[in-house]
Structure formats: C-alpha cells, structure tokens
Amino acid sequence: MTITTTSPRRPELPRPATYLLSFVDSEIATVLDEGEVLRLRFAAAHVDLLPSAHAGTTPDTVAAGYLSGLELLLWPTARPLGDAPPASDLLGRIASGQIEQVRGDEPRAGLAALRRVQVPVVLEGPLTLRLDFANRSSLQLGAHRAEFRLDADARFREALSC
C-alpha cells in the first residue's frame, strides 16, 4: 500500500493590484533611512481585498482584513516637513493618514489627497505623506516617488470582527 501525502500549499496572493490600503488602523513596524530611499515597513496594513482577487466575489462581498509584507519606499530621501519626531515615535498604529499627489503643472490645481491607495502601486510626485500616529506623534514627508511593494511572502488575514 502506498500512502501519498501532500503539504498544504500556501495560497498565492493575487496580482496585480488587488488590495485597497487604508492608512487608518494600519501599523508601522520599522522606518529605515537607507540614504536615497526611506523605507516604511507595515506590521499590519489595513486593507480591503478587492473583488477581482477571488473568483465568485461580487462588489458587495469585499473582504476586509490585514496584510503583512507591505512596505512603502519613498524617493528621494524623504525630508520631514517641519520638526520630525524621534524615530521611535514613528512606529505603531496610524490614527489618520494620506498621501497627497500633485497632478498637472500647477501646484494645488490638481491635488489628490489619497486616504486609500490600491496596492501594489508606484506613484510619481511631487508627493507628501502625512501620518498621525495613535501615540500623538505626526510625520510629513516629501518625495518625488512612492512605491507600495508586496513581499513574496505577503499574507492577507481576514478580519473576524462582526
């Protein structure tokens, strides 16, 4: 008698952009200044899984949950606008946040304040990232490019709240 076993396969994350990131209630795990790039790594990104990600879903059956393995890279080295808080204050839950993108040649004429961003995505600037943390610290960073990138081992976990 032959017994065949199979190991459970980890479900692949849908590609391309199939998640809608909400800055509110997301958590930042690390902030790394790598010279030309500022890297913000999310411990848990609050996202909606878009209908195209699962066969058989309809627009009213979008799943809400948390995504691990998401990072935000900003170019050039993002500079704090105003006084920057200590790096230790830039971790934890985000109370509110948005990324502003100027569209067009005239400043403020085409300003889009994005509180939710479809990920993964690359945004071209000028951009301003504004984050207010639950610990009452805030951060504003300017950049010409922002890339929301998923790791190969990124995982979505559906929220179990009712």
Image (cartoon, rainbow, N blue to C red):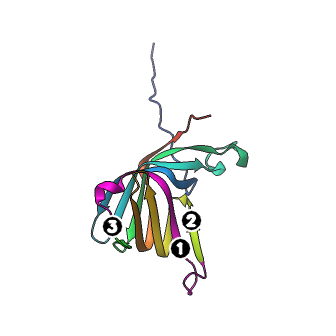
**Disc number for residue 84:** 3
Q: Which residue is mark 1?
A: 101
Q: Is residue 153 left or right of residue 15?
A: left
- Asked if the stretch drawn in magenta spans residue 92, the answer is yes
Front label number (1 vs 3):
3
Residue at image coords 27%, 70%: 35
How crowded pointer 2 is (Cα within 10 Å; few <14, some 14-19, many 20+) is rated as: some
Sequence-earlier tag: 1 or 3: 3
Q: Specify whether residue 155 is in view.
A: yes
In percent of width and height, residue 23 lies at 51, 55
For badge 1, the amino acid type reads Gln
Q: Is residue 41 left or right of residue 21?
A: left
Q: Which residue is mark 2?
A: 114
Q: Which residues are magenta?
A: 84-110
Disc 1 is placed on an element classified as: strand
For badge 3, the amino acid type reads Ala
Place residue 133 in its image quadrant: bottom left
